[in-house]
């Protein structure tokens, strides 16, 4: 296993923890001098804020641990291609290299939809695309498949309950 795979596996563990909590499974680690200095995972539903992306959380923790906002000696590993907000945070934090697993054709801002790192900002991180792509995409695919199955079952149960209420008006009040 390469060093890069080791760090992506750490990000994948965080993504799986998000999935267990009902969050879209995205995990991220920030690495400096061979050590993980920031960890983050998607918690938008739990924290009820659009800002709780894995990258934002990991960058914030890395800044706190290292005592500054410049992370120019750091690499970032994330299971899903960063969105525009996270790509902006990566640029502003001066992250050296971004390693991501799965492409995000709907919001990916490191090449899939747009590449914000190609814009003439004051910092241009290097990008390594597709690190452990199948594993990263698989976690997302499994999560959304299970979510669709759960929602389908909930709709079926609702239909059954509604049908029971209509068929047995004496046992349940119909509004």
Image: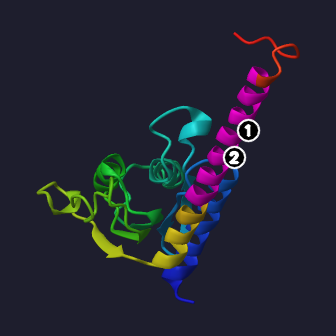
Please indicate whether residue 46 sits to the left or right of residue 123 in the image. Answer: right
Crowd class of label 1 (few under 14; some 14 to 19; many from 20; radius 10 Å): few
Magenta-colored stretch includes residue 161: yes
Return the residue nearer the eye: 125 or 73. Answer: 125
Residue at numbered disc 1: 157
Return the residue nearer the eye: 154 or 48. Answer: 154
SS type, badge 1: helix
Return the residue nearer the eye: 29 or 139. Answer: 139
Most extreme residue toward the right is 171
Residue 148 x/y as whole percent: 59, 51
Most extreme residue toward the left is 120
Magenta-colored stretch includes residue 126: no
The residue at 53%/50% (across/down) is 61
Q: Quadrant of residue 154?
A: top right
State the extent of the magenta-drawn residues as a range. Answer: 143-166
Cα separation, mark 2 vs mark 1, equals 6 Å
Q: Is residue 167 above or below residue 85?
A: above
Most extreme residue toward the front is 167
Residue 76 x/y as whole percent: 43, 65
Marker disc for residue 153: 2
Residue 83 x/y as whole percent: 35, 52
Mark 2 touching mark 1, by CB under 8 A? yes
Please indicate whether residue 85 sits to the left or right of residue 35 in the image. Answer: left
The residue at 50%/78% (across/down) is 134
Q: Is residue 128 above or below residue 25?
A: below
The residue at 50%/42% (across/down) is 52
Please indicate whether residue 104 sits to the left or right of residue 119 in the image. Answer: right
């Amino acid at each position: 296993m390469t060093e890069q795979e080791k760090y992506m596996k750490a990000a994948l563990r965080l993504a799986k923890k998000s999935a267990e909590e009902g969050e879209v499974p995205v995990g991220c680690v920030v690495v400096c001098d061979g050590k993980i200095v920031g960890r983050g995972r998607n918690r938008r539903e739990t924290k009820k804020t659009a800002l709780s992306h894995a990258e934002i959380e990991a960058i914030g923790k890395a800044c706190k641990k290292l005592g500054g906002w410049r992370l120019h000696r750091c690499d970032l590993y994330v299971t899903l291609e960063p969105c525009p907000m996270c790509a902006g945070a990566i640029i502003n934090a001066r992250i050296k290299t971004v390693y991501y697993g799965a492409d995000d054709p709907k919001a990916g801002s490191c090449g899939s939809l747009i590449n914000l790192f190609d814009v003439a900002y004051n910092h241009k991180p290097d990008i390594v695309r597709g690190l452990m792509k199948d594993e990263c995409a698989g976690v997302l695919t499994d999560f959304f498949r299970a979510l669709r199955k759960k929602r389908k079952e909930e709709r079926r149960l609702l239909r059954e309950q509604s049908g029971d209420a209509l068929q047995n008006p004496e046992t349940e009040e119909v509004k």
